[in-house]
Image (cartoon, grey):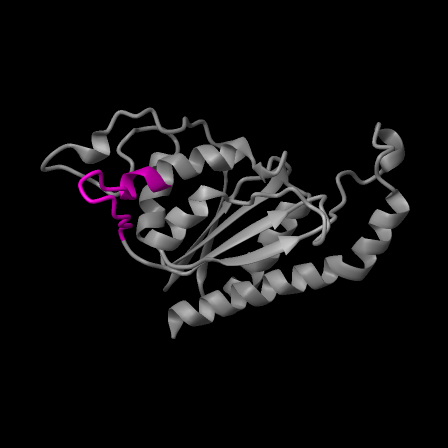
Amino acid sequence: MKKIMIIDGGPRKNMNTAAMIGKFAEGASQAGAEVKVVRLYDLNYKGCISCLACKIKGRASNVCKFKDALTPILEEIAQADGLVLGSPIYFGDVTGQMRTFLERFAFPWLSYNDYSMTAPKKMPVVLIETMNGLPERNNSQGYGSMEYCIASALGQPEHLIAYNTYQVRKYDNFELAGFSEEAKRQWRDEHWEQDLQKAFDMGKHMAETIMS
């Protein structure tokens, strides 16, 4: 059975990013793929420590060799058939946990001999973002320079973005006067189910692609 690894870089188990990932996983599962979801906030791991163990002569590796809770996940991704990365956007960027993951994920691909990028295998990739910004007004840099690394080593990723998402369930309980809950609700009523359907459809499509 073909396997899709989904990496959840969001801190909250029941909010926007988790919901989008859940729908993607549902679509992929219904199409017959094996799906594994990993929540980065549940793991105890570090970013790249520049040990260069992945670049030792005669023993170079394109999977990180540092041993902690992330190591078996990186090894599992290396053997997978599809990959999904999901993160809310904070201060215009993915979460710290996702960025830390990406350091460990991508640095072993980079050759300091010829600056090529080589992953263990190519596979379809989907990058999910959830954010407060609107399509015409947001400061998101998304996955930034890491997207270039992913495209070079794995293949050009697809994007799935949910805009203007709810931050909390009851705005009256928080100091969030800069946001109109009414406007948020209206956007959500018009777009959220469509966003979830897109996630489901993309999951189904990835599964069908890797099994064809």
Q: Is residue 9 visible?
A: yes
Judged left or right of residue 194, residue 96 is left
109 in the magenta segment: yes
Judge whether 116 appears above or below 211 on screen: above
Residue under the image location 29 percent in, 50 percent down: 119
6 in the magenta segment: no
Residue under the image location 82 percent in, 58 percent down: 189
Q: Nearer the viewer, residue 63 or 75?
A: 63
Residue 61: quadrant of the picture: top left
Point out the image quarter for the C terminus.
bottom left
Judged left or right of residue 187, residue 162 is left
Residue 26, position as x, y percentages in the image: 57, 60
Residue under the image location 65 percent in, 42 percent down: 139
Residue 53, position as x, y percentages in the image: 22, 30
Judge whether 157 appears above or below 77 on screen: below
Judge whether 95 appears above or below 184 on screen: above
Residue 194, position as x, y percentages in the image: 71, 63
What's the magenta region?
Answer: 106-120
Toward the left, the furthest residue is 58
Point out the image quarter for the N terminus.
bottom left
Residue under the image location 81 percent in, 40 percent down: 169
Q: Main secondary structure of the magenta part?
A: loop
Judge whether 84 appears above or below 1 on screen: above
